[in-house]
Amino acid sequence: MAIDKLTIDTPEQVHLEFGLANLGSRFMAIFADTVIQFIVYLTLLIIDETALAGALFSRLGYYRVWVSALIIFAYFCLFWGYYAAFEAFWKGQTPGKRWAGIRVIKDTGRPIDAFEAIARNFLRVVDFFPVFYGAGIVTMLLNSRNQRLGDLVAGTIVVHERTQKESDLFFNTSLKAESVLYQATRLSVQEIELIETFLARRLDIPPEVRKQSAVRIAEMIGGKLGIGPESRPPDNENFLELVVQEFRNHAQFR
C-alpha cells in the first residue's frame, strides 16, 4: 500500500522526510505538460502548412523540404526530450510538475542529474502502454514509493514540493557578507544542497534524529574543510547555517 511520507537515509546517514506525490498530483502535472506539448505541436503544424503553401507558390521547392525536415526534428525533440530536458536543467521539474507542486529527486534524497532525467523518461513510452500510462499506474500501485517503471530503473522518486515559505531557510545565526570563516567555497554544490535540504526540513524531523543528523553532517563538512569540533560553534546547526551563508555570499550560489 502506498504511503504518504517517506524517510530517506542519505549516504551520510542523515534522515530526511519527504511527502510522496500521489497519482492525482502526478496526473495534474502530466495534464499540464501534455497541454503545453499539444500547443507546441499545433504551432509546428501551422508552420509546416504555411511552408507548404509557400512552396506551392514559389520556385524554390527545396524550401518546403528543409522546413519539413526541421519540423520533424522538432517533433522528435519535443516527444523524447521535453521531460528529460526540463527535469535535468530545472532541478527535477517540468512546467506541469511545478504547477502541481511536485519534483523528481533521487531515492537518496539528492537532486537528480541529466543521467537520471534521461533514464526515467526513456521508459516513459513503456509506462504509457497499453493506454495512457496503464503500466505506470499498475507499477505505482504495487510499490510503496509510488514509482513507475522509469523511476525504478533510474532510482528516482517524485515528492511534493515544499511551499515557498517552507522552503525558505531560516537562520538562527548571522554572517556578515565580508566575513570569511571556513572557506566554504571548497564545498561542492551537492554538499551545500545536502546541508540546505536538512536545514529546510529540520522542523519535520524528530528532535533526537535531528540532533544526530546535524552531528553527522557537521562532522562530514568539518572534515572536508579541515575544521575540528574545537574550531566551530558548539551548536552543529549554527555551524551549518554559517557554512551555507558563507558559501552563498562568496560563491554567489543560486
Image (cartoon, rainbow, N blue to C red):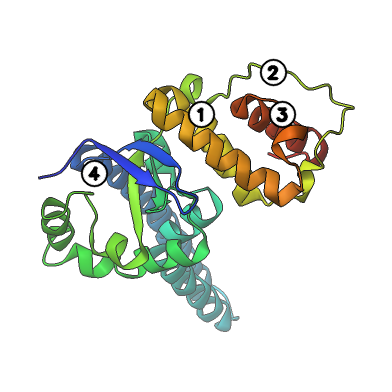
The residue that label 4 is drawn on is 27
Which of discs 1 and 4 lies nearer the camera? The answer is 1
Q: For the residues marked 4 and 3, what is the alpha-carbon distance in whole angstroms?
A: 40 Å
Say if mark 3 contacts mark 2, CB within 8 Å: yes
Q: For the residues marked 3 and 1, what is the alpha-carbon distance in whole angstroms?
A: 14 Å
- The amino acid sitting under disc 2 is Thr
Mark before the other along the chain sequence, 2 or 1: 2
The residue that label 1 is drawn on is 200
Front one among 201 and 24: 201
The answer to whether residue 64 shows anywhere in this view is yes
In this rendering, is residue 125 above or below 37?
below
SS for dot 1: helix
- The amino acid sitting under disc 3 is Leu
User: At which x and y percent is residue 188?
Assistant: 68, 52
The answer to whether residue 46 shows anywhere in this view is no
Disc marking residue 173: 2
Q: For the residues marked 2 and 1, what is the alpha-carbon distance in whole angstroms?
A: 15 Å
- When asked about the image quadrant of residue 76, the answer is bottom left
- When asked about the image quadrant of residue 49, the answer is bottom left
Disc marking residue 241: none
Mark before the other along the chain sequence, 3 or 1: 1
Rendered residue at 11%/55% (across/down): 142
- The amino acid sitting under disc 1 is Ala
Front one among 128 and 249: 249
- The amino acid sitting under disc 4 is Phe
SS for dot 4: helix
Mark before the other along the chain sequence, 3 or 2: 2
Q: For the residues marked 3 and 2, what is the alpha-carbon distance in whole angstroms?
A: 7 Å
Disc marking residue 242: 3
Mark before the other along the chain sequence, 1 or 4: 4
